[in-house]
Amino acid sequence: MATYKKRGYKPKTKAEKLELVEETSTTAEVFNTLDEGASKAEQWVVKNQNYIFIVITIAVIGVLGYLGYNKYIQEPKERTAMNDMFQAQHYFDSAVTESAKDSLYALSLEGGEGKFGMLDIINQYGGTKAGNLANYYAGIAYLNLKDYQNAIKYLSDFSSNDEVLSSVSKGSIGDAFAQLDQLDEALEYYEKAAKISKNEYTAAMYLYKSGTTALELGQHKKALDIFTRIKNEFPEAKGPANIDTFIGKAEASLKN
């Protein structure tokens, strides 16, 4: 085992002299190996410096290009898209509150007064936030116009991190499937909508729709579990006020 030796130490015996020679030789070998490794690394860098430069340049150009694209192309496009969608959104909002719903929903889709409709926004500004939101408006408009296939199409193209919008879009796809008498698909989307939402109103509403659809499909155990969950978790929810009646129906169906 090697022992500590003070600086200036001189070996006295032959064994100590041999040990010192071995230690010196080992140290020299380590440094030589490090020098050789460093030398090889330097040679590799020199040999491939053009390649390295190209890779770094491409990375820098990519970052600068992304920042430039966002600032000078994407952001102005987003603003223009939102401005162009204003009239179509106005028609949609009016359809929700006024009596001439069908004509107003149609105007929100197709446009009017020389302004874009939601379909124009989708085609003209794909990849923007406005274009994405236009899919939601178009889907809901088609749902109200009883064009259920188009409602499913456009709502399926919409995505959002907003809990309520995401939940309502999924639930509305469920409504469209229900109107097409595709109850398995309707149940799937009602369950997705209920799972997304933490809002008491929308969560209870889509759970309720899930339960009634499951009951209609003959899935009585699932229906009972859903109705019981509504009663326990959302006792103040305004929608399913007659939840005890549906619990009774599900229990009776299980006994038959």
Image (cartoon, helix red, strand yellow):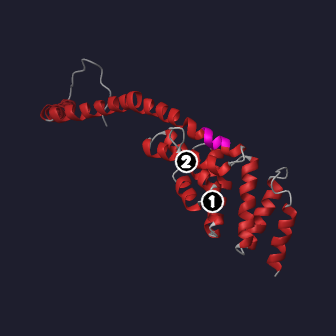
Which residue is found at the position 25% from the left and 32% from the top?
56
Q: In the rendered structure, which disc, 2 or 1, sits on the residue that comes first in sequence?
A: 2
The three-letter code of the residue at mark 1 reads Lys
The three-letter code of the residue at mark 2 reads Leu
Residues 213 and 64: in front is 213
Disc 1 secondary structure class: loop
Residue range in magenta is 90-94
In the rendered image, which residue does mark 1 sit on?
146
Within-10-Å neighbours for mark 1: few <14, some 14–19, many 20+: some
- Main secondary structure of the magenta stretch: helix
- The picture places residue 93, in percent across and down from the top left corner, at 65, 41
Name of the residue lying farthest toward the front: 113
Q: In 3D space, how far apart are the residues under numbered discs 2 and 1 (Cα atoms)?
A: 14 Å
Left-right relation of 252 to 59: right
In the rendered image, which residue does mark 2 sit on?
109
Residues 127 and 243: in front is 127
- The picture places residue 58, in percent across and down from the top left corner, at 26, 34
State whether residue 117 appears in this view.
Answer: yes
Task: Check residue 32 for magenta coloring.
Answer: no
Left-right relation of 166 to 255: left
Disc 2 secondary structure class: helix
Residue 255 location, quadrant:
bottom right
- The picture places residue 192, in percent across and down from the top left corner, at 63, 57
Up/down of 20 relative to 177, above or below = above
Which residue is found at the position 62% from the left and 69% from the top?
182
Residue 66 location, quadrant:
top left
Up/down of 81 relative to 174, above or below = above
Which residue is found at the position 81% from the left and 62% from the top?
228
Residues 12 and 119: in front is 119
